[in-house]
Amino acid sequence: MKQHIAILYADSRFTPWKENVDTSTVKKVHQALSPTYEADIIHMVEPCLALAELLSEYDCVVNLCYGFKNMMQWEVAAWLDEHRIVHLSSSGIVQKIVQNKLQVEALLSGFGLPVARTITSANQIEDRTYIIKPVSGGCHRNISIVRGDELYQKYFLLDPAEWMIQPYIEGREFSVAILPDASGLSFQALYPVEIVPYPKREVYIAGQEYGTTERDFHPVLEPVLHDELIRVALSAHRYTGLEYFSRCDFRVQNNHVYLLDVNAMPNLHPVRSLFPQILRHQNMSIKTLLKRMLARRHFLHQGTGKNSTEGSVYISLN
């Protein structure tokens, strides 16, 4: 008997950060599930009891809902958890932690991982370049890069609960994708992709806000650097309690790795999103990802029909 799976999604227009979710995303996921599973597409119209009851009838839900109107991504996951709906995304409480970059910095530095460090006093400002970014928010959005003298003028106007300031780390930038291994019992990190500024320059960020960047899916890496990127990415995934897939962003300066960000639920748009492109360059597919996530779901829930974080290592910093 085929498992019955729901694909829950909200179009980009209805998500707080206008994620890359549209018909092509949903179509790709639906095609990846068919014909092995019975898959229905359900558009989020309102997180109400009727919808919860409908979703509860499915064996599991592929969660492509990156928030809805005023609800954040983690709040949608928490709503699914509240109604005991099995979904292929990390729990709401874990996603809430990961969304807060300051909490992630404190948590992972406590485990000894090499994270980019936030300054906490104007006395720490030096004559160098800094990056200002939101504590919570979509990756690479609303970022400013300033010199120390300009930052000093702005520092006292920035709410530390909303904004974080870090020394800008010059060097190479990488992104590492993590997904369940073939058994669903553990995790696998894929070969790092490098974000390359084009034309070449010292100050850049992924995306196009500070100039064009390109992606090198097969960068030349010394074995020691490769192994360190993989080690830190897998450790960050486990220590934060993420249960399905994620993506970690890094800067490397003088062969020293700095973790910049952890994405708790990377987007799956087949053309515009990075995670599916990484899969393709590793001879994998969305179908492979979903198969492994379903194996992970079986391992986690063992027929209980409940989301669980039992066995995960994470600390709530509320």
Image: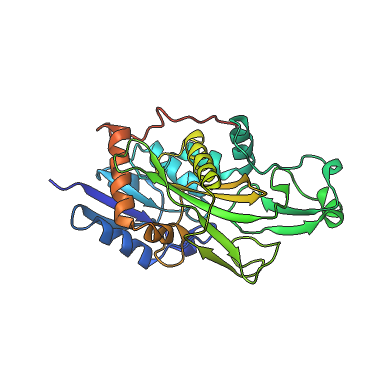
Left or right side of 123 for 9: left
Q: Position of residue 172 (x, y in %)?
A: 62, 56
State whether residue 210 is above or below residue 81: below
Residue situated in front as seen by the camera: 239 or 55 = 239
Taking the spot 45% from the left edge, 39% from the top edge, the residue there is 242
Q: If the image is split into quadrants, where does the N terminus sit? A: top left
Residue 141 visible, this orientation: yes
Residue situated in front as seen by the camera: 63 or 151 = 151
Count up the numbered dots.
0
Left or right side of 147 for 28: left
Taking the spot 63% from the left edge, 41% from the top edge, the residue there is 115
Q: Position of residue 8 (x, y in %)?
A: 35, 53
Residue situated in front as seen by the camera: 281 or 138 = 281
Taking the spot 60% from the left edge, 43% from the top edge, the residue there is 100
Q: If the image is split into quadrants, where does the C terminus sit? A: top right
Left or right side of 258 for 4: left
Residue 55 visible, this orientation: no
Extreme residue in the left direction: 1
Image coloring type: rainbow
Left or right side of 98 for 307: left
Q: Position of residue 291 (x, y in %)?
A: 28, 48
Q: Position of residue 62 (x, y in %)?
A: 34, 50
